[in-house]
Image (tube, rainbow, N blue to C red):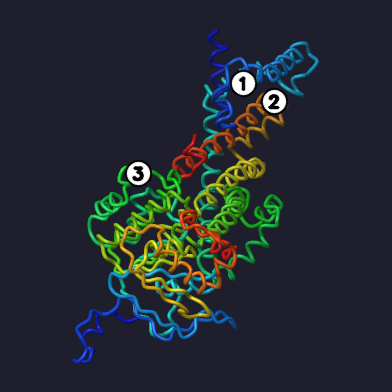
Amino acid sequence: MFFSKSLELLVTLVDTIRFPGTYSGVRWSSLGRRWISPLLLLALWELGARTGVIPSRVLAAPSSVAATFWGMAASGELAGNLGVSFLRVAAGLAIGVGVGTALALTAGLSRIGEDAIDPPVQMLRTLPVLALSPLFIVWFGIDETPKVALIALAVTFPIYLNLFSGIRSVDPKLIEAARSFGVGGFDLIRQVILPGALPSFLLGLRFALAVAVLVLVVAEQINAQAGLGYLINNARDFLRTDIIVVCLVIYALLGLGADALVRAVERRALAWRPTFLKA
Amino acid sequence: MSSPALCGAALPSGLPNAPPPAVDVRGFNRRFGDVVVLSDLNLRIEQGEFVALLGRSGSGKTTLLRTLAGLDPAEGQSVSTPSARAVVFQEPRLLPWTRVWKNVTLGLEGGDARGRAEAALGEVGLEHRAKVWPSTLSGGEAQRVALARALVREPRLLLLDEPFAALDALTRIRMHELVLSLWRRHAPAVLIVTHDVDEAITLADRVLVLDGGRIAAEERIELARPREVAAGFQAIRRRLLRALGVDPRAEQEPRPEAAQPLVSFPVRELQT
């Protein structure tokens, strides 16, 4: 009883993150219905593993994945490696968002800046960032630097593209009205242009977070001594599929958490939008 | 753009000691490429005078208003306006990401901006909406906020660019009353650009018709306020419509006076 209640709570939580507003008025029963087939699959998976249809070196049973998770969490192994991965993403994001914002502001607010910055950035963004990893290893070696640099580079483009177009698409009528009341220069940028471009920036930030987790997965395959990627690589060598699945789940949760974070920021920063006012 | 206050001392001693006009435009020309929009235009608006400017679309009304607002460069021509001036546009143009009262203080200098904004909102009857987001306002409310935003800086020249064109007829009548009462209290010179002949006659001391890049016709409205569609109204209306190239009698004849709608359809058609 308690278990099913808490499971339903988890389902609503996840669903409200994924489809905000969709389930606000729907009864519990229809919520539960959506979870029948995933739970059934989970049960079949468990059954297959227990009966030996699915060997553990192919895929570990859900129960053993859960047990491994608790074990890794209790020993601190998980927290330590997760922390290392988290720091990589955070550093890459901080650098990428900073550089992307600086470039977009320079290009968005001046014609000379646009002419200087936009063409090379538009050319570079056609490169698949992950294809640069060999070059980055040559340049930066195999420790933390190439990993952070790859994430930073990948993050720079969505931030730049969205913020730049956001700045350029601020309603010229609002700018003109502000000018007619004597608002110009830095005040105009602070009061009109930046708030007007904020929705686009946040959209860029959501793309950036998603791509940061994606690049993290690949970047961590480069000779990692710690981190989720290191755990996965190690587990692969010892055919520990349970550990691999635990890490995959963590990656998924990281992506989900990042998305929820941006949504929370949006709800606060864009509270003036009619869509949020009605909710 | 020179301050009109300078003119006073330079007046010849023989002239009566008249106050300098709020707006003084002489021989103004404006062209976009090969298209001449305004040519040799003269316009004088006295302090506290309410002037309406009529014109077909493309006649240059908005160009003239933008020049007076300082949004278009005067290019060294003889255009004199007070430095304290404010514009109300056709759309409210409120910043959606700032609260209503904060919108009213946009670009406002001096102390207690919030107090002054709330007082100005009180004057347009919206003090209770000071803290909401602009997107929650109705069209009429948003335009009243735009009026408050213009009035809070005590302009000596208030420029209204078709401010009620997007509002429904009932809201428009209320806005007319509001604008007149605010004009009486603050006494700025007002220039309202409109395509609605009835609106012009209802509000203004003087109605100008812009055509061919210059003031083509002028009507002084001596009717007492509040004005209603009445006999005297019709004659003025007919003359103004003719100046705009519309002869109402040629189109619909005969038309009983009482059945005349407040919104004039022939002029509306000109717009589209």
Q: Which residue is mark 3?
A: B129
Depth check: give the residue in front, A209 or A264. A264
- Where is residue A261 drawn, in percent x and y? 51, 38
Q: In the rendered view of the protein, which quadrant contains the C terminus of chain B? A: bottom right
Kind of residue at badge 2: Arg
Tag 2's secondary structure? loop
Q: Residues within 10 Å of mark 3 (few under 14, many from 20)?
A: some
Point 54% across, 64% down: residue: B267
Position of residue B189 in the picture relative to residue B263 (left or right): left
Q: Can you tell which quarter of the image residue B107 is in?
A: bottom left
Q: Relative to B19, does residue B230 appear above or below in the rendering?
A: above
- Where is residue B251 drawn, in percent x and y? 59, 65
Position of residue B126 in the picture relative to residue A55 (left or right): left
Kind of residue at badge 3: Arg
Note whether residue B143 is visible.
yes
Point 31% across, 47% down: residue: B125
